[in-house]
Image (cartoon, rainbow, N blue to C red):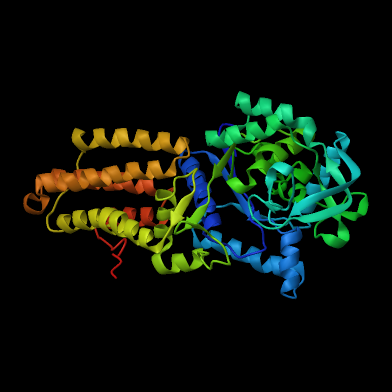
Amino acid sequence: MTNKTKKFYITTSIPYTNAPPHIGFALEAVQADVLARYHKALGEDVFFLTGTDEHGIKTLRVARELGKEPIEYANEISEKFRNLTKILNISNDDFIRTTDEVRHKPAVQKLWLKLEESGDIYKKKYQGYYCPGCEAFKTEKEIVDGKCVIHLKELELVEEENYFFKLSKYTQKIEKAIKSGELEIIPEGKKNETLAMLKQGMEDVSFSRTKDKYWGFEVPGDPEQVMYVWCDALPNYISGIGYDQEAEQFIKLWPADVHCLGKDIMKFHTIFWPAMLLSAKLELPKTIFIHGFINVDGQKMSKSLGNVINPFELVEKYGVDAVRYYLLREIVSTEDGDFTYEKFEQRYNADLAGGIGNLVARTLGISSKIEFKESKPTAKITEVITEIKQNYKNYLNEYKFNEALATVWEIVSFCDKYINEEKLWESKNPQVISDLFFAIKEIGILLEPFLPETSEKIKNSVETKKSENLFPRIVK
Protein backbone atom coordinates (compact mmCIF):
# COMPACT_ATOMS: atom_id res chain seq x y z
CA MET A 1 0.00 0.00 0.00
CA THR A 2 1.36 3.38 -0.96
CA ASN A 3 0.57 6.67 0.72
CA LYS A 4 -1.13 7.84 -2.47
CA THR A 5 -3.48 4.85 -2.73
CA LYS A 6 -6.78 5.14 -0.90
CA LYS A 7 -7.37 2.20 1.41
CA PHE A 8 -10.71 0.45 1.86
CA TYR A 9 -11.12 -1.90 4.83
CA ILE A 10 -14.37 -3.88 4.90
CA THR A 11 -15.63 -6.64 7.19
CA THR A 12 -18.56 -8.97 7.52
CA SER A 13 -19.81 -9.84 10.98
CA ILE A 14 -18.50 -13.17 12.23
CA PRO A 15 -21.22 -15.86 12.46
CA TYR A 16 -21.53 -18.19 15.43
CA THR A 17 -20.25 -21.74 15.11
CA ASN A 18 -23.30 -23.26 16.78
CA ALA A 19 -24.81 -24.25 13.41
CA PRO A 20 -23.75 -24.67 9.77
CA PRO A 21 -24.06 -21.70 7.37
CA HIS A 22 -27.46 -20.77 5.97
CA ILE A 23 -28.52 -18.39 3.24
CA GLY A 24 -28.75 -15.41 5.62
CA PHE A 25 -25.00 -15.19 6.06
CA ALA A 26 -24.53 -15.92 2.35
CA LEU A 27 -26.44 -12.67 1.70
CA GLU A 28 -24.10 -10.70 3.95
CA ALA A 29 -20.95 -12.25 2.49
CA VAL A 30 -22.07 -11.50 -1.07
CA GLN A 31 -23.07 -7.92 -0.24
CA ALA A 32 -19.67 -7.26 1.34
CA ASP A 33 -17.96 -8.91 -1.62
CA VAL A 34 -19.69 -6.55 -4.05
CA LEU A 35 -18.36 -3.56 -2.11
CA ALA A 36 -14.86 -5.04 -1.90
CA ARG A 37 -14.72 -5.80 -5.63
CA TYR A 38 -16.23 -2.42 -6.56
CA HIS A 39 -13.68 -0.47 -4.54
CA LYS A 40 -10.88 -2.62 -5.94
CA ALA A 41 -12.11 -1.74 -9.44
CA LEU A 42 -11.87 1.94 -8.41
CA GLY A 43 -8.15 1.39 -7.82
CA GLU A 44 -8.34 1.41 -4.04
CA ASP A 45 -6.22 -0.82 -1.82
CA VAL A 46 -8.87 -3.17 -0.45
CA PHE A 47 -8.66 -5.45 2.58
CA PHE A 48 -11.66 -7.70 3.20
CA LEU A 49 -12.01 -9.65 6.47
CA THR A 50 -14.47 -12.33 7.52
CA GLY A 51 -14.32 -15.20 10.01
CA THR A 52 -16.17 -17.07 12.75
CA ASP A 53 -17.29 -16.33 16.33
CA GLU A 54 -16.62 -19.48 18.33
CA HIS A 55 -16.64 -18.85 22.08
CA GLY A 56 -19.74 -18.52 24.23
CA ILE A 57 -22.62 -20.59 25.51
CA LYS A 58 -24.24 -21.57 22.21
CA THR A 59 -21.31 -23.43 20.68
CA LEU A 60 -20.52 -25.00 24.06
CA ARG A 61 -24.04 -26.38 24.51
CA VAL A 62 -24.37 -27.79 21.00
CA ALA A 63 -20.97 -29.45 21.29
CA ARG A 64 -21.95 -31.07 24.60
CA GLU A 65 -25.22 -32.32 23.09
CA LEU A 66 -23.18 -33.99 20.34
CA GLY A 67 -20.65 -35.40 22.81
CA LYS A 68 -17.82 -33.32 21.38
CA GLU A 69 -15.29 -30.91 22.78
CA PRO A 70 -16.29 -27.31 21.95
CA ILE A 71 -13.10 -26.65 19.97
CA GLU A 72 -13.65 -29.83 17.95
CA TYR A 73 -17.15 -28.75 17.00
CA ALA A 74 -16.06 -25.15 16.37
CA ASN A 75 -13.33 -26.41 14.03
CA GLU A 76 -15.90 -28.33 11.97
CA ILE A 77 -18.36 -25.45 11.64
CA SER A 78 -15.69 -22.81 11.07
CA GLU A 79 -14.35 -24.86 8.17
CA LYS A 80 -17.85 -24.92 6.66
CA PHE A 81 -17.98 -21.11 6.75
CA ARG A 82 -14.50 -20.93 5.24
CA ASN A 83 -15.66 -23.25 2.45
CA LEU A 84 -18.74 -21.10 1.92
CA THR A 85 -16.53 -18.13 1.04
CA LYS A 86 -14.91 -20.26 -1.64
CA ILE A 87 -18.18 -21.68 -2.98
CA LEU A 88 -19.70 -18.18 -3.26
CA ASN A 89 -16.57 -16.77 -4.90
CA ILE A 90 -16.01 -14.30 -2.03
CA SER A 91 -12.81 -12.26 -2.41
CA ASN A 92 -11.92 -12.00 1.30
CA ASP A 93 -8.25 -11.45 2.07
CA ASP A 94 -8.30 -13.10 5.48
CA PHE A 95 -10.40 -15.29 7.77
CA ILE A 96 -10.17 -14.72 11.52
CA ARG A 97 -11.27 -17.18 14.22
CA THR A 98 -11.97 -16.07 17.77
CA THR A 99 -10.37 -19.24 19.16
CA ASP A 100 -7.07 -18.26 17.50
CA GLU A 101 -4.54 -18.20 20.35
CA VAL A 102 -1.86 -16.54 18.24
CA ARG A 103 -3.65 -13.69 16.50
CA HIS A 104 -6.93 -13.11 18.31
CA LYS A 105 -6.29 -13.82 22.00
CA PRO A 106 -3.43 -11.30 22.43
CA ALA A 107 -5.52 -8.57 20.79
CA VAL A 108 -8.54 -9.24 23.01
CA GLN A 109 -6.37 -9.26 26.14
CA LYS A 110 -4.71 -6.02 25.09
CA LEU A 111 -8.07 -4.37 24.51
CA TRP A 112 -9.34 -5.56 27.91
CA LEU A 113 -6.32 -3.98 29.61
CA LYS A 114 -6.96 -0.73 27.70
CA LEU A 115 -10.53 -0.69 29.02
CA GLU A 116 -9.15 -1.26 32.52
CA GLU A 117 -6.66 1.59 32.10
CA SER A 118 -9.56 3.89 31.24
CA GLY A 119 -11.28 2.90 34.49
CA ASP A 120 -14.14 1.25 32.61
CA ILE A 121 -14.00 -2.30 34.03
CA TYR A 122 -15.36 -3.12 37.47
CA LYS A 123 -16.65 -6.21 39.30
CA LYS A 124 -20.04 -6.68 40.93
CA LYS A 125 -22.67 -9.28 41.78
CA TYR A 126 -25.49 -9.39 39.28
CA GLN A 127 -28.82 -11.05 38.67
CA GLY A 128 -30.50 -10.85 35.29
CA TYR A 129 -32.38 -12.65 32.54
CA TYR A 130 -30.09 -14.06 29.90
CA CYS A 131 -30.91 -15.08 26.31
CA PRO A 132 -28.50 -17.75 25.03
CA GLY A 133 -29.64 -17.03 21.47
CA CYS A 134 -28.55 -13.40 21.68
CA GLU A 135 -25.69 -14.17 24.08
CA ALA A 136 -26.92 -11.16 26.06
CA PHE A 137 -28.69 -10.12 29.24
CA LYS A 138 -32.09 -8.59 28.51
CA THR A 139 -33.61 -5.39 29.84
CA GLU A 140 -37.33 -5.13 30.68
CA LYS A 141 -37.96 -3.47 27.30
CA GLU A 142 -36.51 -6.52 25.52
CA ILE A 143 -38.70 -9.07 27.33
CA VAL A 144 -42.28 -10.01 26.45
CA ASP A 145 -44.11 -12.70 28.45
CA GLY A 146 -40.80 -13.80 29.92
CA LYS A 147 -39.28 -14.35 26.48
CA CYS A 148 -36.66 -12.62 24.34
CA VAL A 149 -38.40 -10.43 21.76
CA ILE A 150 -36.00 -11.67 19.05
CA HIS A 151 -35.78 -15.42 19.69
CA LEU A 152 -39.17 -15.83 21.47
CA LYS A 153 -37.64 -18.33 23.89
CA GLU A 154 -37.73 -18.54 27.67
CA LEU A 155 -34.93 -16.57 29.32
CA GLU A 156 -32.53 -17.95 31.92
CA LEU A 157 -32.20 -16.28 35.31
CA VAL A 158 -28.48 -15.84 35.95
CA GLU A 159 -26.96 -14.74 39.24
CA GLU A 160 -23.19 -14.47 39.62
CA GLU A 161 -20.31 -12.07 40.15
CA ASN A 162 -18.93 -10.67 36.88
CA TYR A 163 -16.83 -7.88 35.49
CA PHE A 164 -18.82 -5.05 33.95
CA PHE A 165 -17.98 -2.49 31.29
CA LYS A 166 -19.07 1.14 31.76
CA LEU A 167 -21.19 1.33 28.65
CA SER A 168 -23.28 4.12 30.16
CA LYS A 169 -20.22 6.38 30.26
CA TYR A 170 -20.08 6.59 26.46
CA THR A 171 -23.71 6.98 25.35
CA GLN A 172 -23.49 10.75 24.80
CA LYS A 173 -20.22 10.48 22.88
CA ILE A 174 -21.65 7.79 20.62
CA GLU A 175 -24.82 9.83 20.06
CA LYS A 176 -22.71 12.84 19.09
CA ALA A 177 -20.59 10.74 16.69
CA ILE A 178 -23.70 9.39 14.97
CA LYS A 179 -25.44 12.74 14.66
CA SER A 180 -22.29 14.43 13.31
CA GLY A 181 -21.78 11.72 10.69
CA GLU A 182 -18.46 10.61 12.17
CA LEU A 183 -20.13 7.22 12.61
CA GLU A 184 -22.49 6.61 9.68
CA ILE A 185 -25.25 4.05 10.12
CA ILE A 186 -27.06 2.76 7.02
CA PRO A 187 -30.01 2.65 6.54
CA GLU A 188 -31.46 5.78 8.11
CA GLY A 189 -34.05 3.76 10.00
CA LYS A 190 -31.37 1.81 11.87
CA LYS A 191 -29.57 5.04 12.65
CA ASN A 192 -32.77 6.35 14.23
CA GLU A 193 -33.28 3.08 16.16
CA THR A 194 -29.78 3.38 17.59
CA LEU A 195 -30.33 7.01 18.59
CA ALA A 196 -33.61 6.02 20.27
CA MET A 197 -31.82 3.34 22.32
CA LEU A 198 -29.14 5.83 23.33
CA LYS A 199 -31.76 8.39 24.32
CA GLN A 200 -33.45 5.86 26.60
CA GLY A 201 -30.11 5.27 28.28
CA MET A 202 -27.82 2.24 28.28
CA GLU A 203 -26.97 0.20 31.34
CA ASP A 204 -23.44 -1.02 31.99
CA VAL A 205 -22.95 -4.45 30.47
CA SER A 206 -21.59 -7.71 31.87
CA PHE A 207 -18.26 -8.44 30.22
CA SER A 208 -17.39 -11.77 31.82
CA ARG A 209 -18.90 -15.04 33.04
CA THR A 210 -17.71 -17.64 35.55
CA LYS A 211 -15.37 -20.17 34.00
CA ASP A 212 -17.38 -23.28 34.95
CA LYS A 213 -20.45 -22.06 32.97
CA TYR A 214 -18.88 -20.55 29.90
CA TRP A 215 -16.32 -21.07 27.15
CA GLY A 216 -13.86 -18.33 26.32
CA PHE A 217 -10.51 -16.71 27.03
CA GLU A 218 -9.65 -16.03 30.66
CA VAL A 219 -9.90 -12.48 31.95
CA PRO A 220 -6.37 -11.06 32.38
CA GLY A 221 -5.44 -11.43 36.04
CA ASP A 222 -8.51 -13.48 37.00
CA PRO A 223 -8.45 -17.11 35.77
CA GLU A 224 -11.85 -17.85 37.37
CA GLN A 225 -13.60 -15.52 34.89
CA VAL A 226 -13.79 -15.77 31.12
CA MET A 227 -14.54 -12.93 28.74
CA TYR A 228 -18.13 -12.46 27.64
CA VAL A 229 -18.69 -13.35 23.99
CA TRP A 230 -19.21 -9.81 22.66
CA CYS A 231 -16.08 -8.59 24.44
CA ASP A 232 -14.28 -11.43 22.68
CA ALA A 233 -16.01 -11.32 19.28
CA LEU A 234 -16.14 -7.63 18.38
CA PRO A 235 -12.35 -7.16 18.56
CA ASN A 236 -11.96 -9.53 15.59
CA TYR A 237 -12.11 -6.42 13.43
CA ILE A 238 -8.82 -5.25 14.93
CA SER A 239 -7.20 -8.58 15.80
CA GLY A 240 -7.46 -9.64 12.15
CA ILE A 241 -5.25 -6.73 11.09
CA GLY A 242 -2.63 -6.92 13.84
CA TYR A 243 -3.85 -4.73 16.74
CA ASP A 244 -1.92 -6.68 19.36
CA GLN A 245 1.41 -5.80 17.72
CA GLU A 246 0.36 -2.34 16.48
CA ALA A 247 1.34 -3.86 13.15
CA GLU A 248 1.91 -1.71 10.08
CA GLN A 249 -1.21 -3.28 8.61
CA PHE A 250 -3.31 -2.13 11.57
CA ILE A 251 -1.96 1.41 11.44
CA LYS A 252 -2.75 1.65 7.72
CA LEU A 253 -6.16 -0.03 7.72
CA TRP A 254 -7.89 1.09 10.89
CA PRO A 255 -10.53 2.48 11.15
CA ALA A 256 -12.74 0.12 9.17
CA ASP A 257 -14.46 1.80 6.24
CA VAL A 258 -17.48 -0.52 6.38
CA HIS A 259 -18.79 -3.12 8.83
CA CYS A 260 -21.50 -5.25 7.14
CA LEU A 261 -23.89 -7.03 9.51
CA GLY A 262 -27.45 -8.18 10.17
CA LYS A 263 -30.07 -6.21 12.06
CA ASP A 264 -30.22 -8.70 14.97
CA ILE A 265 -26.72 -7.70 16.12
CA MET A 266 -27.06 -3.99 15.40
CA LYS A 267 -26.95 -2.81 19.03
CA PHE A 268 -23.68 -4.59 19.69
CA HIS A 269 -22.06 -2.90 16.69
CA THR A 270 -23.61 0.55 16.86
CA ILE A 271 -23.33 0.97 20.66
CA PHE A 272 -21.16 -1.67 22.39
CA TRP A 273 -18.34 -1.64 19.82
CA PRO A 274 -18.04 2.16 19.54
CA ALA A 275 -18.01 2.40 23.35
CA MET A 276 -15.19 -0.15 23.55
CA LEU A 277 -13.21 1.73 20.92
CA LEU A 278 -13.72 5.08 22.65
CA SER A 279 -12.59 3.56 25.95
CA ALA A 280 -9.46 2.15 24.24
CA LYS A 281 -8.87 5.50 22.51
CA LEU A 282 -9.22 4.03 19.04
CA GLU A 283 -10.98 5.60 16.07
CA LEU A 284 -14.58 4.63 15.32
CA PRO A 285 -15.48 2.72 12.14
CA LYS A 286 -16.65 5.02 9.36
CA THR A 287 -19.80 3.17 8.28
CA ILE A 288 -21.97 0.41 9.69
CA PHE A 289 -24.17 -1.12 6.98
CA ILE A 290 -27.10 -3.19 8.25
CA HIS A 291 -29.08 -5.68 6.17
CA GLY A 292 -32.35 -7.45 6.97
CA PHE A 293 -33.34 -11.09 7.27
CA ILE A 294 -34.23 -13.61 4.59
CA ASN A 295 -37.54 -15.33 5.21
CA VAL A 296 -38.56 -18.49 3.38
CA ASP A 297 -41.98 -18.35 1.74
CA GLY A 298 -42.97 -15.62 4.19
CA GLN A 299 -41.78 -17.46 7.30
CA LYS A 300 -38.67 -17.00 9.43
CA MET A 301 -36.04 -19.65 8.80
CA SER A 302 -35.85 -22.19 11.63
CA LYS A 303 -34.77 -25.77 12.21
CA SER A 304 -38.15 -26.60 13.76
CA LEU A 305 -39.97 -25.56 10.56
CA GLY A 306 -37.43 -27.40 8.44
CA ASN A 307 -37.12 -24.45 6.05
CA VAL A 308 -33.44 -23.55 6.44
CA ILE A 309 -31.96 -23.00 2.99
CA ASN A 310 -28.55 -24.57 2.51
CA PRO A 311 -26.40 -22.28 0.33
CA PHE A 312 -24.08 -25.14 -0.69
CA GLU A 313 -26.99 -27.11 -2.16
CA LEU A 314 -28.35 -24.00 -3.86
CA VAL A 315 -25.04 -23.27 -5.59
CA GLU A 316 -24.63 -26.90 -6.61
CA LYS A 317 -28.08 -26.89 -8.23
CA TYR A 318 -28.13 -23.48 -9.92
CA GLY A 319 -24.54 -22.19 -10.03
CA VAL A 320 -22.76 -19.58 -7.97
CA ASP A 321 -23.66 -16.49 -10.01
CA ALA A 322 -27.33 -17.44 -10.14
CA VAL A 323 -27.36 -17.54 -6.34
CA ARG A 324 -25.41 -14.29 -6.05
CA TYR A 325 -27.80 -12.65 -8.53
CA TYR A 326 -30.94 -13.62 -6.62
CA LEU A 327 -29.54 -12.42 -3.29
CA LEU A 328 -28.42 -9.11 -4.74
CA ARG A 329 -31.31 -8.42 -7.12
CA GLU A 330 -34.37 -9.86 -5.40
CA ILE A 331 -33.50 -8.83 -1.81
CA VAL A 332 -33.66 -5.10 -1.11
CA SER A 333 -30.29 -4.51 0.50
CA THR A 334 -31.45 -2.96 3.79
CA GLU A 335 -34.81 -4.72 4.22
CA ASP A 336 -36.10 -8.20 4.92
CA GLY A 337 -36.44 -10.35 1.83
CA ASP A 338 -38.16 -13.58 0.88
CA PHE A 339 -36.84 -16.73 -0.73
CA THR A 340 -38.84 -19.35 -2.57
CA TYR A 341 -37.62 -21.74 -5.23
CA GLU A 342 -40.42 -20.50 -7.49
CA LYS A 343 -39.23 -16.88 -7.22
CA PHE A 344 -35.65 -17.98 -7.68
CA GLU A 345 -36.37 -19.87 -10.89
CA GLN A 346 -38.60 -17.11 -12.27
CA ARG A 347 -35.88 -14.52 -11.70
CA TYR A 348 -33.27 -16.87 -13.17
CA ASN A 349 -35.21 -17.58 -16.36
CA ALA A 350 -36.35 -14.00 -16.91
CA ASP A 351 -33.16 -12.07 -16.13
CA LEU A 352 -30.30 -14.51 -16.57
CA ALA A 353 -31.33 -17.07 -19.18
CA GLY A 354 -33.78 -14.83 -21.04
CA GLY A 355 -31.93 -11.58 -20.38
CA ILE A 356 -28.14 -11.38 -20.42
CA GLY A 357 -27.70 -14.97 -21.62
CA ASN A 358 -30.03 -14.48 -24.56
CA LEU A 359 -28.50 -11.11 -25.53
CA VAL A 360 -24.96 -12.47 -25.69
CA ALA A 361 -26.05 -15.57 -27.59
CA ARG A 362 -28.11 -13.57 -30.15
CA THR A 363 -25.39 -11.00 -30.78
CA LEU A 364 -22.58 -13.51 -31.18
CA GLY A 365 -24.80 -15.79 -33.25
CA ILE A 366 -25.54 -13.03 -35.78
CA SER A 367 -21.97 -11.67 -35.79
CA SER A 368 -20.59 -15.12 -36.63
CA LYS A 369 -22.44 -15.01 -39.97
CA ILE A 370 -20.67 -11.91 -41.35
CA GLU A 371 -17.23 -10.38 -41.38
CA PHE A 372 -17.02 -7.09 -39.51
CA LYS A 373 -14.58 -4.95 -37.55
CA GLU A 374 -15.50 -3.26 -34.31
CA SER A 375 -15.76 0.49 -34.85
CA LYS A 376 -16.35 3.53 -32.70
CA PRO A 377 -19.74 3.22 -30.95
CA THR A 378 -22.49 5.59 -32.02
CA ALA A 379 -23.82 8.38 -29.84
CA LYS A 380 -27.06 6.41 -29.55
CA ILE A 381 -25.38 3.71 -27.47
CA THR A 382 -22.73 5.77 -25.65
CA GLU A 383 -25.23 8.29 -24.28
CA VAL A 384 -27.43 5.57 -22.86
CA ILE A 385 -24.55 3.71 -21.25
CA THR A 386 -22.92 6.86 -19.84
CA GLU A 387 -26.13 7.79 -18.03
CA ILE A 388 -26.69 4.25 -16.77
CA LYS A 389 -23.12 3.97 -15.48
CA GLN A 390 -23.58 7.15 -13.44
CA ASN A 391 -26.79 5.80 -11.93
CA TYR A 392 -25.04 2.47 -11.23
CA LYS A 393 -22.26 4.27 -9.38
CA ASN A 394 -24.71 6.37 -7.38
CA TYR A 395 -26.68 3.32 -6.30
CA LEU A 396 -23.56 1.40 -5.25
CA ASN A 397 -22.34 4.37 -3.22
CA GLU A 398 -25.72 4.24 -1.45
CA TYR A 399 -25.44 0.45 -0.86
CA LYS A 400 -28.47 -0.17 -3.10
CA PHE A 401 -27.24 -3.35 -4.73
CA ASN A 402 -30.59 -4.32 -6.23
CA GLU A 403 -30.98 -0.90 -7.86
CA ALA A 404 -27.43 -0.97 -9.22
CA LEU A 405 -28.05 -4.37 -10.80
CA ALA A 406 -31.34 -3.15 -12.26
CA THR A 407 -29.44 -0.43 -14.16
CA VAL A 408 -27.29 -3.08 -15.85
CA TRP A 409 -30.43 -4.79 -17.09
CA GLU A 410 -31.53 -1.46 -18.55
CA ILE A 411 -28.61 -1.87 -20.96
CA VAL A 412 -29.75 -5.41 -21.71
CA SER A 413 -33.27 -4.15 -22.47
CA PHE A 414 -31.93 -1.32 -24.63
CA CYS A 415 -29.84 -3.76 -26.66
CA ASP A 416 -32.77 -6.15 -27.16
CA LYS A 417 -34.88 -3.24 -28.41
CA TYR A 418 -32.01 -2.05 -30.65
CA ILE A 419 -31.76 -5.51 -32.25
CA ASN A 420 -35.49 -5.62 -32.93
CA GLU A 421 -35.70 -2.05 -34.26
CA GLU A 422 -32.82 -2.65 -36.66
CA LYS A 423 -34.06 -6.15 -37.58
CA LEU A 424 -30.46 -7.20 -37.11
CA TRP A 425 -31.17 -10.83 -38.07
CA GLU A 426 -31.96 -9.53 -41.57
CA SER A 427 -29.75 -6.46 -41.96
CA LYS A 428 -26.68 -7.82 -40.15
CA ASN A 429 -25.63 -4.16 -39.92
CA PRO A 430 -21.93 -4.09 -38.91
CA GLN A 431 -22.32 -0.80 -36.99
CA VAL A 432 -25.20 -2.17 -34.92
CA ILE A 433 -23.22 -5.32 -34.18
CA SER A 434 -20.25 -3.18 -33.17
CA ASP A 435 -22.49 -1.12 -30.88
CA LEU A 436 -23.80 -4.29 -29.30
CA PHE A 437 -20.28 -5.60 -28.71
CA PHE A 438 -19.44 -2.31 -27.02
CA ALA A 439 -22.55 -2.57 -24.83
CA ILE A 440 -21.89 -6.19 -23.89
CA LYS A 441 -18.31 -5.36 -22.89
CA GLU A 442 -19.66 -2.59 -20.64
CA ILE A 443 -22.20 -5.00 -19.15
CA GLY A 444 -19.37 -7.43 -18.39
CA ILE A 445 -17.41 -4.73 -16.57
CA LEU A 446 -20.41 -3.56 -14.56
CA LEU A 447 -21.29 -7.13 -13.58
CA GLU A 448 -17.83 -7.97 -12.23
CA PRO A 449 -18.50 -6.98 -8.60
CA PHE A 450 -21.82 -8.84 -8.65
CA LEU A 451 -21.29 -11.84 -10.91
CA PRO A 452 -17.53 -12.26 -11.34
CA GLU A 453 -17.73 -15.64 -13.06
CA THR A 454 -20.29 -14.39 -15.59
CA SER A 455 -18.28 -11.23 -16.16
CA GLU A 456 -15.24 -13.31 -17.09
CA LYS A 457 -17.29 -15.52 -19.41
CA ILE A 458 -18.70 -12.45 -21.20
CA LYS A 459 -15.20 -11.06 -21.63
CA ASN A 460 -13.98 -14.34 -23.13
CA SER A 461 -17.01 -14.62 -25.42
CA VAL A 462 -16.48 -11.11 -26.81
CA GLU A 463 -12.74 -11.65 -27.30
CA THR A 464 -13.09 -15.03 -29.01
CA LYS A 465 -16.37 -14.16 -30.80
CA LYS A 466 -17.61 -17.51 -29.58
CA SER A 467 -20.82 -17.75 -27.57
CA GLU A 468 -21.29 -20.03 -24.62
CA ASN A 469 -24.55 -20.80 -22.86
CA LEU A 470 -24.17 -18.52 -19.86
CA PHE A 471 -27.37 -19.55 -18.13
CA PRO A 472 -29.23 -22.61 -19.46
CA ARG A 473 -32.96 -22.11 -19.04
CA ILE A 474 -34.59 -24.04 -16.19
CA VAL A 475 -37.27 -26.27 -17.66
CA LYS A 476 -39.82 -27.98 -15.44
- Residue at the (54%, 35%) spot, across then down: 189
Left or right: 444, with 88 as reference point: left
Q: Quadrant of residue 20?
A: bottom right
Q: Can residue 281 be seen at all in this image of the molecule?
A: no
Question: Which image quadrant: the N terminus?
Answer: top right
* Of residues 69 and 392, the one drawn nearer to the viewer in this rendering: 69
Residue 216 or residue 246, whichever sits in front: 216
Q: Position of residue 183 (x, y in %)?
A: 63, 31
**Quarter that holds the C terminus:** bottom left
Q: Is residue 466 left or right of residue 278?
A: left
Q: Position of residue 135 (x, y in %)?
A: 73, 53
- Closer to us: 449 or 397: 397
Return the residue found at the far bottom: 67
Q: To which quarter of the image does residue 332 belong?
A: top left
Do we see residue 227 in this rendering? Answer: yes
Q: Residue at x 71, y 74 (%)?
A: 66
Q: Residue furthest front?
A: 145
In the image, residue 6 above or below residue 71: above
| Position in image of residue 278 (x %, y %) | 75, 33
Q: Is residue 325 above or below residue 402?
A: below
| Above-or-below relation of 282 to 438 | above
Task: Find residue 165 and report its horizontal and vertical position in percent.
Answer: 82, 40
- The tally of labels here is 0
